[in-house]
Amino acid sequence: MLMTKERRPAIRTLRGWALVVLHEAGAIHECEEHNWAKDRADPHARKRALDIARQEPPDDLSPDQAVAEVREVLDSIGDSCPECD
């Protein structure tokens, strides 16, 4: 039987792709009330996200560029919701 790897859905922006990777890896989660992305501060999840970015970059990016984008997005996310503070 031929096995195929399930592809992620098409994402319109590079930032959107990075957010999906971070969420899938468990590095970020959403504020339940306001839906803001929040950093989980989990080093293992961050490593998983970077590994995913390196191994499965978008078609138009090199693995190094994909990792840089994930790092940039992660650096822009805080550990608390701006509306809850």
Image (cartoon, helix red, strand yellow):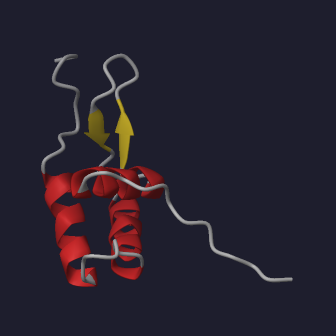
Decide which of 32, 54 is in the foreground and name it: 54
In the figure, residue 57 lies in which quadrant?
bottom left
**53 lies above or below 13:** below
**78 lies above or below 84:** below
* Numbered disc total: 0
Q: Which quadrant: the C terminus?
A: top left
Residue 8 position in % (x across, y down): 50, 60
Instruction: Single out the residue that lies furthest toward the right.
Output: 1
Decide which of 2, 35 is in the foreground and name it: 2
Q: Residue at x 42, y 56 (%)?
A: 10
**67 lies above or below 28:** below
Residue 17 position in % (x across, y down): 33, 56
Q: Which quadrant: the N terminus?
A: bottom right
Position of residue 81 in the picture relative to residue 2 (left or right): left
Decide which of 33, 56 is in the foreground and name it: 56
Position of residue 22 in the picture relative to residue 83 (left or right): right
Decide which of 65, 84 is in the foreground and name it: 65
**7 lies above or below 13:** below
Q: Residue at x 34, y 76 (%)?
A: 59
Q: Residue at x 22, y 16 (%)?
A: 84
Residue 65 position in % (x across, y down): 19, 76
Residue 27 position in % (x across, y down): 36, 53
In the figure, residue 50 lies in which quadrant?
bottom left
